[in-house]
Amino acid sequence: MGNLALFMSIYAFSLIYRTEAFTIGPGSRFCARQSNVGGNVSQGCSVHAGRGVYTSSRLDPPSVTSLSSTWRGAKEISGLTESTAAPVFDVEKIRQILPHRFPFLLVDKVLEFEPGKRAVGVKQISANEDQFNGHFPNRAIMPGVLQVEALAQLAGIVALQPPISNGQGNFFFAGVDGVKWKKPVVPGDTVVMEVELTAWKEKFGIAKATGKAFVDGKPVIEVGEMTFALVR
């Protein structure tokens, strides 16, 4: 019985020794010993308050370097993004035209508007938008269907204004064809959209339009044809 107890004690001690020998972590004996030997600290350990502390290179903050050789500041950069003209419709006017509300109102302002024909609008993409909670948690991308929806809402602004309509009623998607996504739309992007009405059948209340959108001058989506049913 005495020999068995001695064997179990030796076995338990060997397990503890091997664990400590191969573990480099906060408070581990390996780091603690290294911090007290001639001031030398092994990789993965640093000295803090006389104890060995584990530091992983993966958690170290990245080195920050200047991304531009010339500092311009917020005022100058804001001038670069300034619209060439005041918006034709701001968000309050858009709310009067479209029935959509947060979080599904996807046109922030209209910059150009030709009654009954076409419009240019803007959608600012924010990281705080609900869809990014699930699309996707580790890589936020604006869903393609919402890009189509944003173009449809801009087309709706044209369709729900004279001479197509008197601003009363609603419009519904009846079809969409020829959709091509060119590149992902992500938080921080400013999406500039353009739609053009290609047909209006007043007897049936049917409107058709094409649409496209750009980020930084590069196309992100093209829609060959959107069909809407206007209901008064």
Image (cartoon, rainbow, N blue to C red):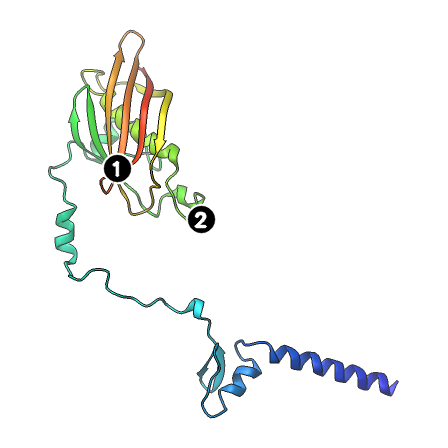
Camera sees residue 99: no
Q: Amino acid at mark 2?
A: Pro
Q: Amino acid at mark 1?
A: Phe
Q: Can you identify the residue that label 1 sits on?
A: 214
Q: Secondary structure at mark 1?
A: strand
x, y percent for residue 54: 49, 76
Residue 167 relative to residue 11: left or right? left
Q: Is residue 158 above or below residue 110?
A: above
x, y percent for residue 194: 23, 30
Q: Residue at x 44, y 48 (%)?
A: 137
Q: Which of the two marks, 2 or 1, is nearer to us in this view? A: 1
Q: Nearer the viewer, residue 108 or 135?
A: 135
Q: Alpha carbon of mark 2 to alpha carbon of mark 1: how far?
A: 24 Å
Q: Is residue 96 above or below residue 63?
A: above
Q: Residue at x 40, y 69 (%)?
A: 60
Q: Can you identify the residue that label 2 sits on?
A: 137
Of marks 2 and 1, which one's residue comes earlier in the chain?
A: 2
Q: Residues within 10 Å of mark 2 (few under 14, many from 20)?
A: few
Q: Nearer the viewer, residue 7 or 48?
A: 7
The answer to which image quadrant residue 18 occupies is bottom right
x, y percent for residue 210: 28, 23
Q: Residue at x 28, y 27 (%)?
A: 211
Q: How many badges with numbers are in the image? A: 2
Q: Secondary structure at mark 2?
A: loop
The quarter of the rendered structure image containing the N terminus is bottom right
Q: Is residue 92 above or below residue 117?
A: below
x, y percent for residue 174: 38, 18
